[in-house]
Amino acid sequence: MTALIVMCFVLAAVFFVLGCMDQRKLYWKLAAWQYRRPEATEPSEAAHVFNRIGLFLGAAMMLVLAAILNAADASSTYSTAQVRSVASSAASDLNQGTQSGIGSSVRASSDLYDAVHEHGGGNVKIRSAGSGEYELTNRDGENPVCLTVTVDNDLNIGGGIGEPWSHSISTSVNDGSC
């Protein structure tokens, strides 16, 4: 997004400089070569004025576009509350009660990454902080939230039919770094 904003500023500067130049000389340097007799097809003074106005309007439009893009870029940076909301949504996706089979912290981690990307829409970064802790930040690396994931495996001996193993995943969300 930053490259697009910079490109808008560069184009605005180019349009402004071209608008400040003598339009007749600009015609002779850039467009006259296309005609067999350029003197006969040279634009009128009014056409040169309209060309100058168009260049200045183009520069102004590029500046307005750069301001709009900058505002959109700034508004897509998540606050701590928004990062915490994504962390809570991802945590609720993992908290599905007791399930059969052996739980794996690797699978829980994979599910967590998927949930954060789904709920964060690319505006939240996640990194492992070790020991089941994950630090979530906005895409600029600011506003950290710590999400802790614990996988509890239980062996049910003497249960009879069904899986002897069950597991549950518990999560907690805290503001600040892990």
Image: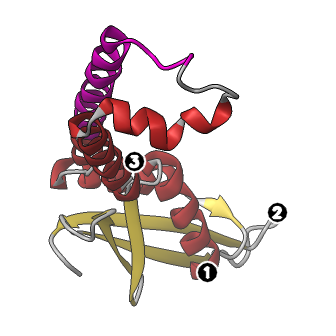
Q: Secondary structure at mark 2?
A: loop
Q: Closer to the observer: label 1 or label 2?
A: 1
The correct choice, above or below, for 37 with respect to 140 in the image is above
Q: Secondary structure at mark 1?
A: helix
Q: Amino acid at mark 1?
A: Val
Give the CA distance from mark 1 to mark 3: 19 Å
Residue assigned mark 1? 106
Which dot marks residue 89?
3
Q: Amino acid at mark 3?
A: Ser
The picture places residue 134, in percent across and down from the top left corner, at 37, 76
Would you call the spot at circle 3 few (<14 residues within 10 Å), some (14-19), or many (20 or more)?
some
Q: Quadrant of the C terminus?
A: bottom left
49 part of magenta stretch: yes
Residue assigned mark 2? 162
User: Quarter of the image holding residue 109?
Assistant: bottom right
Q: Amino acid at mark 2?
A: Gly
Between 7 and 166, the residue placed more toward the observer is 7
Give the CA distance from mark 3 to mark 2: 31 Å
Q: Earlier in the sequence, mark 1 or mark 2?
A: 1
Would you call the spot at circle 2 few (<14 residues within 10 Å), some (14-19), or many (20 or more)?
few
- Residue lying farthest to the bottom in this orientation: 130
- The residue shown at (31%, 39%) is 15
The picture places residue 166, in percent across and down from the top left corner, at 65, 69
Q: Closer to the observer: label 3 or label 2?
A: 3
Please, what is the dominant secondary structure of the magenta stretch?
helix
Can residue 141 be seen here? The reply is yes
- The residue shown at (17%, 55%) is 80
The picture places residue 169, in percent across and down from the top left corner, at 49, 66
Q: Which residues are magenta?
A: 40-66
